[in-house]
């Protein structure tokens, strides 16, 4: 990237380029998952470990919410907590992911405990929560912009899994339906905020680095899943082991 200040549209183009190059839909594990190449135990390992990421998203959002300087910003970001933690009328994304995990054959108590997840997944997700807690508000908001790329991967994931795994139903994958509308709405706000507030070349470098970091967090989770449950298949002690 040039050291000079980008226009807002040029900055958006650079952000989108990061997704084209680094988003985790490119990871070999996702290709296997979507194409029906994983067995039931490998799909269970994915659902179990991904739950930890889903369950920590509200903690990440709450950490950022506490630092936002205006009522308007806090009101906007609070909606994300409702989307994931749920309300009286909406069960929320965390509970919907537990339902997904149960639908692929996992014990919901095991899933919710997070006792059996891979250490690498825990380290990556905790690093993301700490990033949002410790970095500038601008960097924290920018790190959420992987949502720019999620609708495409959601559509691919749902269609691929329904087509290739006879034991997975639309009800199992119900987590993803609200995200098709929630993610674009979240992206619209976050992208506008970043384009408006990244008003120096240094701030623009920070937001681009923040999005690359978030892509690395998502990619790393799949790295450790692939290493542990696909090739070479070295499962660490104390974590989930699929039943043979």
Image (cartoon, rainbow, N blue to C red):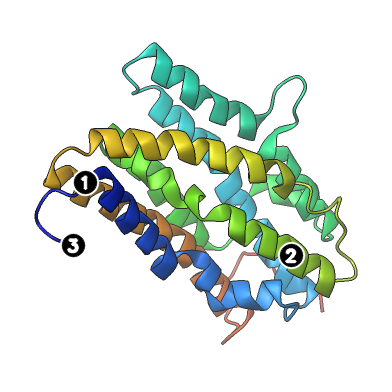
Q: Earlier in the sequence, mark 2 or mark 3?
A: 3
Q: Secondary structure at mark 2?
A: helix
C-alpha distance separating marks 2 and 1: 44 Å
**What residue does disc 2 label?**
44
Compare residues 82 and 184 and report the one nearer the observer. Answer: 184
C-alpha distance separating marks 3 and 1: 13 Å
**What residue does disc 1 label?**
7
Q: Identify which residue is drawn at 56% across, 25% down.
A: 79
Compare residues 14 and 44 and report the one nearer the observer. Answer: 14
Mark number, residue 1: 3
Residue 113 image point, x, y percent: 67, 46
Mark number, residue 244: none
Q: Identify which residue is drawn at 51% across, 56% down.
A: 149
Residue 42 image point, x, y percent: 71, 73
Label 3–label 1 contact, CB within 8 A: no
2 vs 3, front mark: 3
Badge 3 crowding class, 10 Å Cα cut-off, few under 14, some 14 to 19, many 20 or more, is few
Label 2–label 3 contact, CB within 8 A: no
Please give left or right for residue 239 compared with residue 212 in the image. right
């Amino acid at each position: 990237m040039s050291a000079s200040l980008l226009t807002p549209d040029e900055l958006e183009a650079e952000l989108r380029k990061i997704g084209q190059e680094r988003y985790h839909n490119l990871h070999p594990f996702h290709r296997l998952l979507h194409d029906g190449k994983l067995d039931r135990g490998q799909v269970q390992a994915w659902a179990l470990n991904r739950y930890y990421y889903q369950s920590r998203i509200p903690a990440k959002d709450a950490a950022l919410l506490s630092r936002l300087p205006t009522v308007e910003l806090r009101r906007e970001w609070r909606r994300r907590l409702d989307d994931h933690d749920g309300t009286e009328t909406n069960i929320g994304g965390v509970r919907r992911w537990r339902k997904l995990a149960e639908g692929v054959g996992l014990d919901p108590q095991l899933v919710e405990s997070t006792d059996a997840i891979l250490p690498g997944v825990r380290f990556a997700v905790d690093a993301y929560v700490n990033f949002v807690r410790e970095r500038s508000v601008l960097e924290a908001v920018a790190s959420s912009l992987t949502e720019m790329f999620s609708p495409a991967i959601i559509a691919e994931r749902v269609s691929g899994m329904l087509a290739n795994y006879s034991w997975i139903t639309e009800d199992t994958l119900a987590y993803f339906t609200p995200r098709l509308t929630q993610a674009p709405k979240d992206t619209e706000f976050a992208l506008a905020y970043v384009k408006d507030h990244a008003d120096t070349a240094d701030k623009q470098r920070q937001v681009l680095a923040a999005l690359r970091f978030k892509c690395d967090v998502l990619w790393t989770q799949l790295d450790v899943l692939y290493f542990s449950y696909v090739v070479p298949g070295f499962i660490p002690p104390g974590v989930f082991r699929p039943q043979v």
